[in-house]
Image (tube, rainbow, N blue to C red):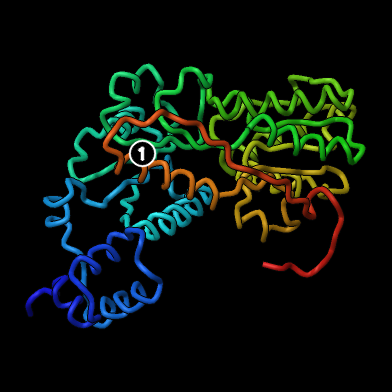
Amino acid sequence: MAAVTLKDVAERAGVSIKTVSNVVRDAPKVSPATRERVMRAVRELGYRPNPSARRLRTGRSGLIALAVPELTIPYFAELAHHIRTQATALGLTVLIEETLKDPAEELRLATGVGASLLDGVILSPLHVTTTELAPVADAFPLVLLGERSYERDHVVSDHVLIDNVAAARDATAHLAGLGRTRLAAIGADRKGSATSRQRLEGFQLALHAAGLPFDPRLAPPVAEFDRGNGLLAMRSLLELPAGLRPDAVFCFSDLLAIGAQRAVHEAGLSIPGDIALAGIDGSQEGLYSTPSLTTVVPDKAAIASLAVRCLAARIRSQEPLPFEVHVAPHRLEVRESTVEQRRPLSP
C-alpha cells in the first residue's frame, strides 16, 4: 500500500498542501476550524510524517531526547510523562534515555556526540560540569534539569530547576512549626551532590529561624536518594540515645521518606505521633502510602513546559540565544505524616 502523502491529506481536507504542512508542523496562523479539518483527515487516512523528508527539507528531524539517571525513580517517570505531553503539543517526538548515573554517558548526551538524528537533548545530570560543557555550549541544543552547582554568571546552558534551598526550608519550617524540637535530615553528603548541599542549607536555615540547633548527628549521610538508604538512615537515628532521638525528620526525597517510614514502623513507633516525617518530590507513591506523606511538590508540568519550550526555541532559532535559568514553582502539600487527618483520599 502506497504511503499517504501531504497531497492526499490536502485533497481530503479541501485545503492546500502548504496548509497541511503548517498544521503538521504546528505552525501559527492556521484557524482552529481549518486545523481540526486537517487533523481529521490525518486521522482518517492514517498519515504519518516522513522524518527523512522533513530532515532534508528543514535540517531537523523533530526528534529530541530526554536523559534521566533512572526511570525506576517515580519523580523521573512522572516528569518524563509531562515532557512527552509538552513535546507532542509542539510536534516533537521524545526518545527517553537512562544515563544510569554514568558521567561519560551524561557528557555524551549533553554534547550531542553520536546523536546525529537528535535535534536536541533535555538532560537531568548528576556529574557533568560547566567546565566540560563550556567548550561545546553553542554547538548543540541542550537544556539541563535539576542539579546546579554554579552561580548565575557561569551559566553555559539553559537550565530549569526548583529552588532547592527554599523547598527544604519550607518543609523544615513546617516541622518546626508543629512544635517539634529535635529535627533530623536524611539525605546529606550524597556523593558531593549539589542538590544534597542545597537542601541541607535550607534545612539549616529553617532551624536557625526557629531558634533550633543543628546537630550533625541528626544528619546521617546517604549514598543515594532511595528507599534502602532512607531505611538505613532512619534506623541509625532511632538507635541514638532517647534524649537525642528525633521527633521530626525531613528527607531529601520521597523515596528516602518511604524507606524511613518502614524503619519507624519496624521500631513500633507511630507517624506522626512519635515522629513527624516530610519528603520532597510530590510523587504518587507518597500520596498512597500509609500514612500519606507530607511533601514538597515541584510543579512538574511547569518544569516540562519550560524545558521543552526552551529547547524548541533553541532548535528553531537561526541565531545564538542567551542562556537562561528558569526556576519552576513548588508548594508544600501537608498530609498525614505530619498532621493527624483521617479523611478519604482524593486522587
- Is 66 rendered above or below residue 164? below
The location of residue 337, given as percent across then percent down, is 78, 50
Would you say 344 lies left or right of 67 here?
right
Rendering quarter of residue 163? top right
Would you say 121 lies left or right of 222 here?
left
- At 61% from the left edge and 56% from the top edge, which residue is drawn? 285
Residues 285 and 130: in front is 130
Q: Which residue is mark 1?
A: 99
Indicate the quadrant containing the N terminus: top left, top right, bottom left or bottom right: bottom left
Residues 12 and 303: in front is 12
- At 40% from the left edge and 37% from the top edge, which residue is drawn? 143
Would you say 309 lies left or right of 189 here?
left
The location of residue 331, given as percent across then percent down, is 70, 46
Rendering quarter of residue 101? top left
Q: What amino acid type should be assigned to the residue bearing mark 1?
A: Thr
- At 35% from the left edge and 35% from the top edge, which residue is drawn? 142
- Is 273 rendered above or below residue 170? below
Would you say 230 lies left or right of 333 here?
left
Asked whether the viewer can see residue 236, the reply is no
Most extreme residue toward the right, as rendered? Answer: 179
The location of residue 123, given as percent across then percent down, is 39, 38
